[in-house]
Image (tube, rainbow, N blue to C red):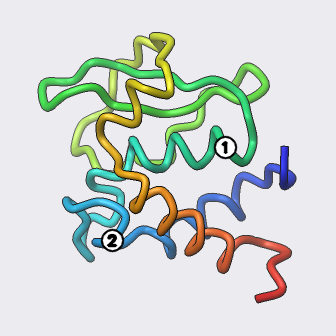
């Protein structure tokens, strides 16, 4: 792990880091829209744990499990609660919905805004 996991800090930094450059569905009124793939990959890169998915009508929804606890940082994009299935997902699964450029953009924006950042 490259940084300590502080739930509130991570959530706040993600909300500020998401943009049209990190997911094409992003809007100011729904900043988490379309961010699940790129966000789950970033969280996996930074904090380890497992990648998980739940099939939804619009496609697979990705999120993480760290130390046995589920973290879905992009659940706010949905109008209804998700019936989580917690199916194991591979990195390749999640990468199908996020480009390298989007991941690099999110990582740079997140690191600028994360707690303890000196930038």
Say whether disc 1 or disc 2 marks the residue closer to the N-terminus.
2
In the figure, 73 relative to 13: above or below?
above
User: At numbered mark 2, what does the secondary structure look like: helix, strand or loop?
Assistant: loop
Relative to 48, 1 lies left or right: right
Q: Nearer the viewer, residue 79 or 74?
A: 74
Which quadrant is the C terminus positioned in?
bottom right
Picture coordinates of residue 101 (x, y %)? Answer: 40, 62
Q: Which label is found at residue 90?
A: none
Residue positioned 58% across, 63% down in the render: 107
Q: Looking at the image, which residue sits at the far bottom?
A: 119
Mark 2 residue crowding within 10 angstroms, few (<14) / some (14–19) / many (20+)? some
The image shows residue 19 at horizontal and vertical percentages of 36, 72
Would residue 36 appear left or right of 67 to someone viewing this image?
Answer: left
Q: Which label number is shown at residue 21?
A: 2
Q: Which residue is mark 1?
A: 45
Q: Residue 34 at what x, y percent from top left?
A: 27, 51
Image quarter of residue 61: top left
Residue in front for this viewpoint, 78 or 91: 91
Question: In which quadrant is the N terminus drawn?
Answer: top right
Q: Which residue appears at 50% of the width and 39% of the height?
A: 72
Question: Where residue 59 appears, x then y in whole percent?
Answer: 19, 27
Within 10 Å of disc 1 (Cα), the crowding (few <14, some 14-19, many 20+) is few
Q: From what the image shows, is residue 35 above or below residue 90?
A: below
Q: Quadrant of residue 50?
A: top right
Residue drawn at x 26%, y 44% is 78
How many marks overall? Answer: 2
Q: Position of 67 compared to 77: left or right?
A: right
Q: Secondary structure at mark 1?
A: helix
- Give whichever of 69, 34 is nearer the camera: 34
* CA distance for labels 1 and 2: 19 Å
Q: Are marks 1 and 2 in contact (CB under 8 Å)?
A: no
């Amino acid at each position: 792990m490259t940084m300590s996991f502080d739930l509130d800090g991570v959530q706040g930094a993600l909300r500020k880091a998401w943009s049209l450059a990190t997911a094409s569905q992003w809007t100011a009124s729904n900043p988490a829209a379309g961010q699940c793939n790129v966000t789950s990959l970033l969280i996996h890169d930074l904090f380890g744990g497992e990648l998980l998915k739940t099939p939804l009508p619009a496609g697979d929804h990705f999120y993480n499990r760290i130390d046995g606890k589920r973290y879905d940082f992009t659940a706010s994009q949905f109008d209804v609660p998700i019936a989580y299935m917690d199916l194991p997902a591979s990195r390749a699964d999640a990468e199908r919905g996020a480009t390298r450029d989007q991941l690099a953009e999110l990582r740079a924006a997140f690191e600028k805004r994360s707690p303890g950042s000196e930038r």
